[in-house]
């Protein structure tokens, strides 16, 4: 959870309304980490111990499920050691601490999910669940039938063999080709490496679907909460 004002924390925990919580603070009934608080400017996070009349306030963090249309130039981590912008920077107005489910490369755009639900993350990222991920890519040249068959059968990439995949030609764009690729693995830069293995460099790459959840017309850089039905279908 991000730091929020103490009275808001008490209201979210169901202790009292925000106005009533402010009165309790002024009365010296609220402590943070064993220190009595009497002003309204104090903020707390999930690492703090808050008590009211000496009784600890126990909160169950609300589960959050978000879909984001990630632009190129953002990393799929909560923090970046090189100071690059992260996907979390695009959802700053979400109060709870959330993190990306899986990853999208710095130079790949499209659908990424964020949550604070560890079980949800496990279900979507563990290889045994084989959740399909669908990408649209512009690749150099025009893939031949035998190259597509090799791609779909699985390729030897560095030290691993990829699982069977789907490869659909959508359109020719000058000297390049727009294709749709479906895989259920998530190795580092896997789609790019697979395309290069059949002789076609990826020029642009965008993820448009995870399992049954499609990016749709969500604008780049924007996000929305998943619906209850979407969450259920992913589970």
Image (cartoon, helix red, strand yellow):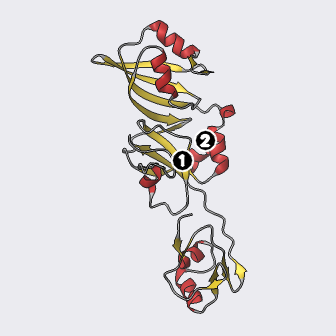
* Residue at numbered disc 2: 233
The correct choice, above or below, for 27 with respect to 120 in the image is below
| Residue depicted at 54% across the width and 16% down the height | 152
Work out which residue is located at the far front of the displayed protein and give it: 82
Q: CA distance from mark 2 to mark 1?
A: 19 Å
Residue 162 is drawn in which quadrant? top right
Residue 160: give x, y in percent of width and height: 62, 22
Work out which residue is located at the far left of the displayed protein and give it: 174
Point out the image quarter for the C terminus.
Answer: top right
Residue 148: give x, y in percent of width and height: 48, 12
Judged left or right of residue 218, residue 124 is right
Q: Which mark, residue 25?
A: none
The correct choice, above or below, for 210 with respect to 90 in the image is above
Q: Secondary structure at mark 1?
A: strand
In this rendering, the label closer to the viewer, 2 or 1: 1
* Residue at numbered disc 1: 100
Residue 165: give x, y in percent of width and height: 56, 21
Judged left or right of residue 235, residue 23 is left
Residue 35: give x, y in percent of width and height: 63, 84
Point out the image quarter for the N terminus.
Answer: bottom right
Work out which residue is located at the far top of the displayed protein and give it: 146
Q: Secondary structure at mark 2?
A: helix
Judge by depth and name the residue closer to the eye, 145 or 188.
188
| Residue depicted at 35% across the width and 15% down the height | 141
| Residue depicted at 61% across the width and 22% down the height | 159
Discs 2, 1 touching: Cβ within 8 Å: no
């Amino acid at each position: 959870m991000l730091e929020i004002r103490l009275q808001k924390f008490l209201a979210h925990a169901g202790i009292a309304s925000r106005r009533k919580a402010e009165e309790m603070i002024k009365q010296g009934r609220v402590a943070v980490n064993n220190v009595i608080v009497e002003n309204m400017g104090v903020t707390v996070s999930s690492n703090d111990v808050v008590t009211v009349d000496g009784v600890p306030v126990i909160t169950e963090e609300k589960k959050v499920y978000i879909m984001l249309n990630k632009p190129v130039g953002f990393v799929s981590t909560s923090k970046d050691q090189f100071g690059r912008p992260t996907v979390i920077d695009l959802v700053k107005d979400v109060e709870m601490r959330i993190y990306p489910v899986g990853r999208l490369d710095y130079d790949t755009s499209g659908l990424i999910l964020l949550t604070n639900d560890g079980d949800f993350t496990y279900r979507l990222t563990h290889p045994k669940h084989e959740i399909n991920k669908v990408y649209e890519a512009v690749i150099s040249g025009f893939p031949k039938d035998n190259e597509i068959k090799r791609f779909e059968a699985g390729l030897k990439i560095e030290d691993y063999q990829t699982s069977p995949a789907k490869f659909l030609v959508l359109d020719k764009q000058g000297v390049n080709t727009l294709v749709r690729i479906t895989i259920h693995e998530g190795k580092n830069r896997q789609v790019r490496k697979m395309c290069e293995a059949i002789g076609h460099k990826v020029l642009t790459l965008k993820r448009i679907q995870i399992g049954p959840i499609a990016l749709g017309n969500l604008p780049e850089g924007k996000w929305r909460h998943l619906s209850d039905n979407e969450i259920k279908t992913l589970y």
